[in-house]
Amino acid sequence: MTKTKTQRKITRGITKEFAKAFKQSELYKLYVEHKDELFIGVRNDYLNLYYNCDSIAKVEYKKREKIIDYKIDQYYLDGNHYSSKDELKRCKIEAKDICLYYDIIKKHSNEKASLEKKAQSKLVLLNNENLHSNWFCIDIEYVKSFKNKIEKEDAGFNARFDIIALSKMKPHKVALIELKYGSGAIGGRSGIYKHVADFSKFCELGYFEKQLREEIIEIVKSQKELGITVPFETPEKYDILSPEFYFITLDNNAKSVNASTPQQTMAGYLFNDKRWGCKRLTSKDSVEKKFGDITRKDNKFFATFLFSKATLENIEIADIIDGIYDERILPI
């Protein structure tokens, strides 16, 4: 972590002292035993332990006391939903108790997590377990940090990415990925239009150059301190290329014979004409009307679209970007 005496710099990462203490904890042992289903997310001076892309534990280091502090959403212990104002919603817990109740925590997460989040977790873990993948996923559920409420309001959006992946070869390509699962995830408030708007704003405000590139370095550095098997050395700034944007859609299947596939539905929101076999255009503003044709490299913002018919039960994509997809639409 990098700080100055005059100003705290917003960046990802934890101290070596924190990493050393955590590696001696029971929760770290649990992670090592269940790497096939758990992911450690590096945050600003804390860690999130993810199962199903659900944060099942927040891990902080108390420097003065030199102890690890653990918190958990009470839901994962008793299955009851609490309001954000309820004091029980986030409670302290001992590492040994997280281990003791791990099966219960998983049960409640499995009941709560969407198919999309479960598929996201599976896709990331399959990729990272594959030594032959061209990519390594360094983060999930990324949310940009802001210095204060005013800065966040001025930005006008939350910069969120489902997955951040780096290519294993230098110079490292950066994949900023949004995952969609089935037709129900294409429209609505968190649908394709909203994500394109956020991605475009992210580029417009230069957040990669201002913040994310350095955060990527700090994430990798912290992962190595934690003993996570990152398959490359910690990159320097000049090793990291500008980001590429990806929309990955799983369960690209029509619900009935005459229904649209998610790809066809997505086309209705993206374009002003019926491409990709689109059957109906959106009655609202299309992405193309506001942001241009994002499948073209000469557009201000562009992305790659990957489609797979695989469902949660049969996902076998072992390379998150270069793996086998049923349809791959590259920007032209």
Image: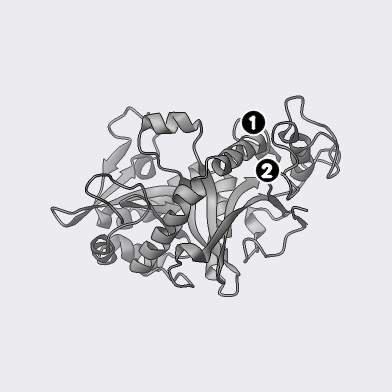
The answer, for residue 110, to whether it is visible in the render is no
- Return the x and y of residue 135 as percentages of the image width and height: 57, 66
Reading the chain from its start, which is encountered first: label 1 or label 2? 1
Q: Nearer the viewer, residue 327 or 241?
A: 241
Spatial CA distance of label 1 from label 2 is: 24 Å
Residue 191, image quadrant: top right
Numbered label attached to residue 300:
2
Mark 1 falls on what kind of element? Answer: loop
Mark 1 burial class by Cα count in 10 Å: few <14, some 14-19, many 20+: few
Mark 2 falls on what kind of element? Answer: loop
- Return the x and y of residue 298 as percentages of the image width and height: 74, 48
Q: Nearer the viewer, residue 160 or 122?
A: 160
- Return the x and y of residue 12 as percentages of the image width and height: 37, 53
- Residue at the image position 57 percent from the left and 40 percent from the top: 204
- Please state if 117 lies on the left or on the right of 109 as rendered: right
Q: Residue furthest top?
A: 283
The answer, for residue 179, to whether it is visible in the render is yes
- Please state if 112 lies on the left or on the right of 319 as rendered: left
The quarter of the image holding the N terminus is bottom left
Mark 2 burial class by Cα count in 10 Å: few <14, some 14-19, many 20+: few
Q: Residue furthest bottom?
A: 132
- Return the x and y of residue 21 as percentages of the image width and height: 23, 63
Amino acid marked by disc 1: Gly
Numbered label attached to residue 188:
1
- Residue at the image position 72 percent from the left and 55 percent from the top: 308
Up the image or down, 38 lies above or below 230; here it is: above
- Residue at the image position 73 percent from the left and 25 percent from the top: 284
Of circles 1 and 2, which is in front? Answer: 2
Residue 322, image quadrant: bottom right
Q: Nearer the viewer, residue 201 or 286?
A: 201
